[in-house]
Image: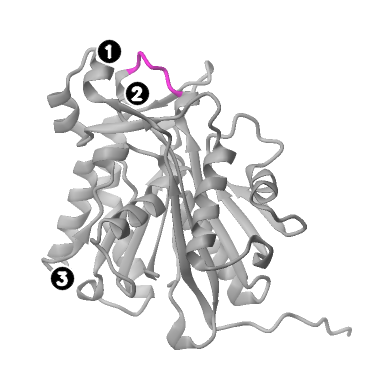
Amino acid sequence: MTSLRTAPPVAGARIIGLGSSQPDRVVTNDELAQRVATDDAWIRSRVGIVERRFAAESDSVVSMGADAGSKALADAGLAPTELDAVIVATCTMPNPIPNAAAQLSDRIGVNGIAAFDLNAACAGFCYGVGVGADMIRAGSARNVLVVGSEKLTDWLDMDDRSVCIIFADAAGAAVLTAAGTPEEVGVGPVVLGAAGDLVKTIGIDEQNYLRQEGQAVFRWATTKIAPVALQAIERAGLTPADIDVLVPHQANLRIVEAIAKKLRAEGARDDLVVADDIVHSGNTSSASIPMAIDHMRAAGRVRSGDVALLVGFGAGLSYGGQVVVLP
């Protein structure tokens, strides 16, 4: 029998750079109230959002993602030519072909490397980090750029209060690299799954508008996601008390707070830092987790070496989570 050579595996992966990008236009609750039946107090009480960013016509999934990716590379101290793969998590490309990753790679100055998209909606970044870390551990790549980028406003019915007050546009990115020793591993095992029986709760209708059954999604997220987070902690060989930072997908501030409450009931510390980027950025799907970390780092709320629990969830209904060490 012929024996095929395989790449030598490595201990694992770690994150060495972060970046994010948002459009210039800030949209307040008061501005939205001029179009739909709502007001600032109602939006804050239901979803916790004060303002969000809407992209200009010239902004795209690719352009915002390239901006975030370039910032992440600069933060990591890597040149684009040192990358082996680009993974773009997105569910809002205007067309399925060509993919975002190949276009993004060219924009940042590298071609001839692996470049592909994945769609797990709001869980996309966690899926991307999981796939990128597995590529590194298997020896298929050494440096991987993972980008979550969304232009959700292309898919919004601005007369539908259930979606227009929540979703927004942005991109976030992380650079993964090979960990030289087991002690340097900074990305834990990923927990992935999907509740396909609930697939109709979030989707695109025949008019190409995003629709969701908000209450059904809320109930699912507040009951099913905390156990996923706890499983990710266990797979990493840690306990809830070891987690310094909780970064759930920024879907709704009430969901974020519910997940944090359940983790504290299971032993997470009172001083657990909880991401609340939803307040000023809205729900940006796959971009929300990396952007939240980038914003918290800029504000001095997290430090290099902090142990962070990431957990994404959304349309599919897809979910994923892992523990990482922040760069």
Magenta segment range?
Answer: 156-160
**In the picture shown, does residue 196 fall above or below 128?**
above
| Residue 30 seen in the figure | yes
**In the picture shown, does residue 226 fall above or below 21?**
below
Q: Which residue is mark 3?
A: 267
Residue 67 is tagged as none
> Label 2: few (<14), some or many (≥20) within 10 Å?
many
- Residue at 20%, 61% (x, y): give it: 273
- Residue at 53%, 31% (x, y): give it: 59
* Left or right: residue 285 compared with residue 117: left
Q: Are marks 3 and 1 in contact (CB under 8 Å)?
A: no
x and y percentages locating residue 159 in the rendered image: 35, 13
Q: Are marks 1 and 2 in contact (CB under 8 Å)?
A: yes
Of residues 77 and 238, the one drawn nearer to the viewer in this rendering: 77
Q: Which residue is mark 2?
A: 164
* Left or right: residue 309 compared with residue 205: left
Marks 1 and 2, how far apart in space? Answer: 9 Å
The disc labelled 2 sits on which kind of residue? Cys
Q: Which residue is mark 1?
A: 36
Instruction: Work out whether mark 3 precedes mark 2 in sequence or the reverse, and give the earlier one.
Output: 2
x and y percentages locating residue 236 in the rendered image: 37, 76
Magenta stretch holds residue 286: no
Marks 3 and 2, how far apart in space? Answer: 37 Å
x and y percentages locating residue 105 in the rendered image: 67, 51
The disc labelled 3 sits on which kind of residue? Gly
